[in-house]
Image (tube, grey):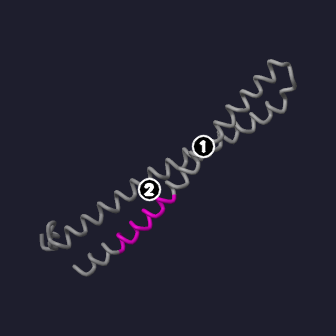
Amino acid sequence: MNKKLQDLSTLLKIKLFKKRDLLETLKKELLHIETQIQYLQEQIAQFSEARHKRFLSRSYTCAYDKHLEHLQREQTSLYKQRMALNTQLHNSYIDIQKHIDRIKIIEKIRINKYPLKSANN
């Protein structure tokens, strides 16, 4: 029984390390999307300012409008991706915590801090 518990604990630790790797990947993706959003916000601010100057001088602003719409659609898409990644990240944290709790319980059972009830009881 002790060997089985140790094997189960080892398997859960392997899964835990894989999930931690996934968590790090999600964090990197989230950081990348955050930098893209920041860059897009800067671009939108620059184009808005340039469009406003053109508008004040009564110049042609249609191209600026189209480009701003494109940037705003891209920004919305990035916000949706960020929200999905945040959800995945949160779920990964919860999953990792569950694995850690399972490992702790198995280790405590294995070293007899939580003795298993016998079948006779």
Q: Position of residue 84 (x, y in %)?
A: 55, 48
**Residue 116 point in image, percent of width and height:** 17, 70
As rendered, which of 46 and 29 lies closer to the eye? 46
Residue that protrudes farthest toward the right in the picture? 60
**Tag 1 residue:** 80
Q: Is 58 placed left or right of 9 in the picture?
A: right
Quarter of the image for residue 42 reads top right
Query: In the figure, 86 relative to 22: above or below?
Result: above
Name the residue at 22% across, 79% down. Answer: 2
In terms of secondary structure, what is the magenta stretch mainly?
helix
Marks 2 and 1, how far apart at CA: 18 Å
Secondary structure at badge 1 equals: helix
Q: Which residue is mark 2?
A: 92
Magenta run includes residue 12: yes
The quadrant in which the N terminus is found is bottom left
- Report if residue 111 lies within the magenta region: no
